[in-house]
Image (cartoon, rainbow, N blue to C red):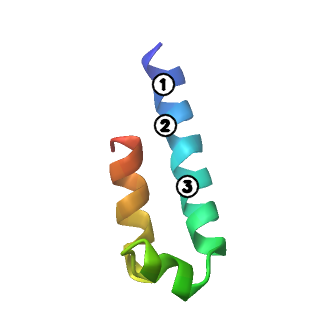
């Protein structure tokens, strides 16, 4: 069960990083996120 949750969390993390990475700098700025913050934001969103 733990392994399945970890894999699911990893998938969500990668999807979040991918989605945020496709956004323009302007869109990220509107959200208060810098491009260098994407991975940290994704980790926080998933709960790593």
The nearer-to-camera label among 3 and 1 is: 3
Q: Are marks 2 and 1 in contact (CB under 8 Å)?
A: yes
Q: Are marks 3 and 1 in contact (CB under 8 Å)?
A: no
Measure the C-alpha gap from mark 3 to mark 1: 16 Å
Report the residue at 44% width, 82% height from top.
Answer: 29
Q: Which dot marks residue 28?
A: none
Q: Which dot marks residue 16?
A: 3
Relative placement, left or right, of 13 versus 41 is right
User: Mark 1 falls on what kind of element?
Assistant: helix
Number of callouts: 3
- Of 3 and 9, nearer the camera is 9
Report the residue at 49% width, 77% height from top.
Answer: 28
| Vertical arrangement, residue 12 with respect to residue 5, above or below | below
User: Mark 2 falls on what kind of element?
Assistant: helix
The nearer-to-camera label among 2 and 3 is: 3
Q: Which dot marks residue 5?
A: 1
Q: Residue furthest bottom?
A: 26
Report the residue at 49% width, 37% height from top.
Answer: 9
Q: Circle 3: is it few (<14), some (14-19), or many (20+) Cα within 10 Å?
A: some
Report the residue at 55% width, 62% height from top.
Answer: 17
Measured as percent of width and height from the top left, residue 38 is found at 44, 69
Measure the C-alpha gap from mark 2 to mark 3: 10 Å
Relative placement, left or right, of 47 versus 27 is left
Q: Residue furthest top?
A: 1
| Vertical arrangement, residue 18 with respect to residue 27, above or below | above
- Of 16 and 3, nearer the camera is 16
The mark nearer the N terminus, 3 or 1, is 1
Measured as percent of width and height from the top left, residue 12 is found at 55, 43
Q: Which dot marks residue 9?
A: 2
């Amino acid at each position: 069960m733990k392994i399945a949750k970890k894999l699911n969390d990893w998938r969500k993390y990668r999807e979040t990083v991918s989605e945020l990475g496709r956004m323009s700098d302007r869109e990220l700025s509107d959200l208060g996120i810098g491009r260098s913050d994407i991975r940290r934001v994704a980790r926080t969103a998933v709960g790593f």
